[in-house]
Image: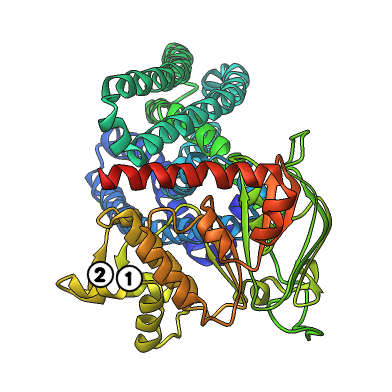
Amino acid sequence: MKTVFSYIRPYKWPIAIALFLMLMELAVELIQPLLIAKIIDDGILAKDSTVIWTWGSVMMMLAFIALVSGVVNSYFAAHAAQSFAYDLRQALFRQVQAFSMATFLRFPTAGLITRLTSDVTMVQNVLFMGLRIMLRAPLLVIGSIVMAFVVNPKIALYLVVGAPILLFFLYFMARKGVHYFARVQDRLDRLNRVMQENLQAVRLIKSYLRGVYEVGRFSKVANLLKKDTVTAMRMMELILPVLMFVMNVSLMAVLWFGAIEVQDGSAQVGELVAIVNYAMRMTSAFSMFAFIIISFSRAKASSERMEEVLLANEGIEANHHEGIGFSEKLGDLRFEDVSFQYPGKAEPILDHVSFHIQPGEKLAIMGSTGSGKSTLLNLIPRIFEASSGSIYVSGTEVKCWPLKELRDTIGLVPQQSMLFTGSILDNLSWGDRDAHVDELENAARKAQIHESIDLFPKKYGTRVGQKGVNLSGGQKQRLSIARALVRKPSILILDDSTSALDVRTETALWDALATEDSTMLVVTQKIHTAQGADKILLLDEGKVVGYGTHVELMKQSSLYRKIAESQAEGDVLSDAEDYS
């Protein structure tokens, strides 16, 4: 919890003021039984109305002070708790943004969402309630015991006889609570993951009529969450009955032996009333302990989960180098004996891959599903780090590049076209926030999407739904390509980014991209696309099984010939069907 609650430090003064005001409330509450005892002994029993009015007025004045203290305390407590939660969320989100992909994959997406929402809210509420009432409860118990001994030590002994039992019981329940509520939060992660998958795949689920199955899957996960939550809450609910039982036994002892003391004349009626009053206040405070332990247990479990993110120092992306000079022209790319395997996996995804692309050349990358094509592309901007070997961009090893400068030279179009909620203009501006509108439109023209945008009523101001839900697959791909072109990259990476385009549109796209002064890496399954490349890299199970031009590979690679022949047959069949 230490790391999480270190974010409280900037708000130490609001917290100090809130604590001071809370102590003011507590002081008033502890003084009142003494004043009641004085009014009974010196006023009511002595039949002195002056004492009653004087000390009654003092009690009213103290009650007003407690009221003002409580209102102002709430203001400062809320300010500190909300500000703390804001800073903590910012820190968590910044840390997640700094993760390398390898580190990011260690944390399920649903788990990160829970940490940024539910877990932060949990510790925020504990801080607020701690400054408002949670700290007040144990202090009220301690203060009541101390004040009871001040009033009459002999009777007060009966009040604290069960204290050792209660302390051991509360410690045991707190330890158990942390364990149980950590499981509850893990179950919540799983529930969020099922919900996230369902909402993302809603079209597929409806197409395959899998709604009933998904409801069943959700019910299983929700039922596990319910069971663990019920188990945790049932255990926590034992706290209050046990506390109340012990306190009521202590209160009965105070009344029984206190009455004897009053009859013997060794104690006054006001003293007994004051101690009973303190006992009642302790009982009401103990009723808060179940809530306190539940809240603390959940907050501790949540803080430990957040610390896993905040303390994940390995795999954090950072710039460790100053600007660098280039010995070769921008866009030169060279892989030298590069291998890669995911953490925890025995088999390499890429196995001793080597090739060299000159500036301005176009490389087509082909291979079956799972051959390592996308992984290879992700090594260039250091989304993943190569396990062995070296990658050189513009003559400098990628590890020596400042991360921002490296990625500024690269335009990446991922396999799945990802668009963000906002206008088309906003999405294009992702490529370069400083780009002029004319530059954005020029990139859209090259990507063959300008005409489609022009048909929308609001043109470039058209809103894009979540993940581009209101656009076709081809439109999303072309917008993603335009976004990358806005960067004017030295290296343009297209990861199977034209799969949804028809032949005419794709041909027009390649003709437009031919004027770009960029080195291009294109993942494709289409032979006619590969034919237009300067070189073709053929991968199979992570190994290079062919490298050269289309003509060279037709002569040298049986696998490439097989792919070419199968696509040629498909084209012939397609033409025959069109003719018929």
Instruction: Give above or below for 332 relative to 343.
Output: below
What label sits on residue 452 in the rendered view?
A: 2
Q: Residue at horizontal 30%, vertical 22%? A: 215
Q: Amino acid at mark 2?
A: Ser
The location of residue 406, given as percent across then percent down, is 67, 73
Q: Residue at horizontal 78%, vertical 33%? A: 346
Instruction: Give above or below for 81 relative to 456.
Output: above
Q: Residues within 10 Å of mark 2 (few under 14, many from 20)?
A: few
Instruction: Give above or below for 572 relative to 195.
Output: below
Quadrant in the rendering for residue 225: top left
Q: Nearer the viewer, residue 30 or 154?
A: 30
Instruction: Give above or below for 332 relative to 415.
Output: below
Q: Secondary structure at mark 1?
A: loop
| Quadrant showing the N terminus | top right
Q: Amino acid at mark 1?
A: Ile
Are dots 2 and 1 in contact, CB under 8 Å? yes
Q: Residue at horizontal 36%, vertical 65%? A: 505
Residue 206 in view here: yes
Residue 8 in view here: no
The location of residue 464, given as percent across then percent down, is 28, 62
What label sits on residue 449 in the rendered view?
A: 1
Instruction: Report how far apart the C-alphas of labels 2 and 1 lie in the structure.
Output: 5 Å
The location of residue 26, given as percent across then percent down, is 43, 46
| Quadrant showing the C terminus | top left
